[in-house]
Structure formats: structure tokens, C-alpha cells
Image (cartoon, grey):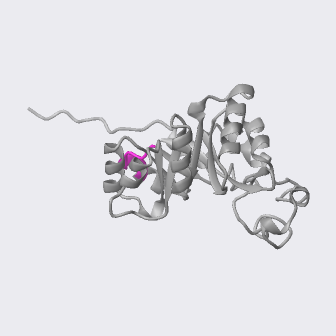
């Protein structure tokens, strides 16, 4: 089961910062998940539309200029990075799941993906575009059908994974509280990878692994790696008495 660092190693470093990326890579993660918003002609890596949770100011992203946003402290002296800066930090050392949050134009993102492959050592198989905005995912597939997309859901739909199959997604990303064995089985039958967010407890990791889940998003990748990559101990079978 893949270990994907949720906003980087966000339990030990400010989320979505270059420090969080560095720490996640050093932990040996399979992938990193980040969030992207459009601001002016740039793509900033930040989760919320509002700034007060992760910076020292109150207000919305749209209330500030790009230059001012780039000056803010995102925790421990870190700045809000651009998507390209994160790509430069990761450099193909693991996969990168780019969640499209405040994004309305996909072409600039697609160009950045191409540039990352050409200049930073990424393979297209390491780059995944995900979103709750399924219209964006549909548009991406119309323009670049070969790119990997991940369809996010915060519920367990009546038709399970059918919507992600319709979108020709590579993976379906579901909230921990709503995933169940039937959902996983349906997604697998449709050829989808199943990723679950956000998973920090080892008991949940064991449950999801038993269900056949392919990957988890976690704030604690070091804990997940230590638990999931330890050898599985099986009890020896006792021969029957004759």
C-alpha cells in the first residue's frame, strides 16, 4: 500500500511548504500530495482560500497581491511556495499528486507538467492531477487523455465508483469515514486505483490494507512507513495429529 504524504510531512512541518516536502522525501514516501490555487499568473501551493490558519494574516487569497502572498510566513519561516518550486524540490524522487483547488484554467498546469518531465526528471506516470471539481478532470482528459487523473469524493455514492470510471480517471480518492469493502471492490472491478484520505492510525492502515486499498494519504508518513513496511508475521501451521 502506497504511503502518500498529505501536504508533505504535515504533522512535523508546516503543511504545503518546501520544508514539508523535504522531510517527506527524507522519510522515503512513495508520493506527496499538494494543493494548488491560481493567483494572478502563478500557481501557489496552499490548501485554504483563507489565510489565517496557515499564515500570520487574516483574509482571502484574492485579497492580496501575489507579491504580498509570497512574503507571508507559512510557519517556521517558510514561504508559500509555487507549484514549480515544489516540483523543483521533488525532482522525480517520488510521485506528486497535485490537487486542483482554486484552479479554473488547466492549460498552464499541463504546460508545467510537460516542463517538469523535460527538465526535472519526472515521468508522466509520477504526476497525478486530482480534484473534487470533476468538470476540470473531464476537461483535462479531453485535452490530454494520456495524463493521470484522480477523482475525489467526500461521500460513498450510490453507484460507488461509477463516476470516476465515467471520467476515465486513474484513481479514486475517498474519505476514510466513507470507504467500505464494497466500494473498494467496485472500484477495482472498474480498473481504478483506490486511495483513502486522511489515514494516521495504524489500525485504520491495517483495515484498509486488508480491503485491498492501493494507497493512503497521511499526515504522518514516518509512522505509516514504519508500520506498513515491517515484515508481516504469519503464524506457523501446526500439522494435524495422525
Percent coordinates x, y for residue 88 in the rendering: 77, 36
Q: Is residue 19 above or below residue 114?
A: below
Q: Is residue 65 left or right of residue 169?
A: right
Q: Give whichever of 9, 107 is nearer the camera.
A: 107
Name the residue at the bottom extreme: 58
Q: Residue at x 56, y 40 (%)?
A: 143
Q: Give whichever of 5, 119 is nearer the camera.
A: 119
Position of the C terminus by quadrant? top left
Q: Residue at x 74, y 55 (%)?
A: 38
Q: Is residue 83 left or right of residue 141?
A: right
For residue 216, say whether it is visible.
Answer: no
Q: Quadrant of residue 233?
A: top left
Percent coordinates x, y for residue 76 in the rendering: 85, 56
For residue 16, say whether it is visible.
Answer: yes
Q: Bounds of the magenta span? A: 208-214
Q: Residue at x 77, y 64 (%)?
A: 54
Percent coordinates x, y for residue 199 in the rendering: 53, 56
Q: How many marks?
A: 0
Percent coordinates x, y for residue 156 in the rendering: 39, 63
Name the residue at the left extreme: 242
Q: Give whichever of 138, 148 is nearer the camera.
A: 138
Q: Would residue 72 be counted in the magenta stretch?
A: no
Q: Would residue 209 be counted in the magenta stretch?
A: yes
Q: Is residue 199 above or below residue 21?
A: below
Q: Is residue 38 left or right of residue 153?
A: right
Amino acid at each position: 500500500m502506497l504511503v502518500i504524504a498529505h501536504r508533505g510531512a504535515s504533522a512535523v512541518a508546516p503543511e504545503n511548504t518546501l520544508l514539508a516536502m523535504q522531510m517527506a522525501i527524507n522519510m522515503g514516501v512513495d508520493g506527496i500530495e499538494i494543493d494548488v490555487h491560481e493567483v494572478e499568473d502563478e500557481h501557489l501551493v496552499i490548501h485554504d482560500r483563507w489565510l489565517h490558519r496557515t499564515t500570520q494574516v487574516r483574509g482571502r487569497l484574492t485579497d492580496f497581491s501575489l507579491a504580498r502572498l509570497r512574503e507571508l510566513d507559512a510557519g517556521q519561516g517558510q514561504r508559500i511556495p509555487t507549484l514549480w518550486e515544489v516540483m523543483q524540490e521533488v525532482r522525480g524522487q517520488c510521485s506528486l499528486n497535485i490537487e486542483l483547488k482554486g484552479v479554473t484554467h488547466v492549460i498552464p498546469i499541463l504546460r508545467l507538467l510537460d516542463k517538469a518531465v523535460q527538465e526535472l526528471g519526472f515521468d508522466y506516470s509520477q504526476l497525478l492531477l486530482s480534484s473534487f471539481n470533476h468538470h476540470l478532470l473531464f476537461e483535462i482528459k479531453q485535452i490530454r487523455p494520456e495524463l493521470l487523473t484522480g477523482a475525489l469524493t467526500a461521500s460513498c455514492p450510490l453507484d460507488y465508483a461509477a463516476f470516476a470510471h465515467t471520467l476515465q480517471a486513474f484513481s479514486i480518492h475517498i474519505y476514510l469515514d466513507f470507504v467500505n469493502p464494497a466500494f473498494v471492490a467496485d472500484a477495482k472491478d472498474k480498473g481504478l486505483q483506490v486511495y483513502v484520505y486522511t489515514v494516521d492510525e495504524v489500525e485504520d492502515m491495517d483495515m484498509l490494507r486488508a480491503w485491498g486499498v492501493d494507497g493512503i494519504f497521511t499526515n504522518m508518513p514516518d509512522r505509516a512507513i514504519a508500520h506498513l513496511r515491517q515484515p508481516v508475521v504469519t503464524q506457523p501451521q501446526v500439522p494435524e495429529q495422525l
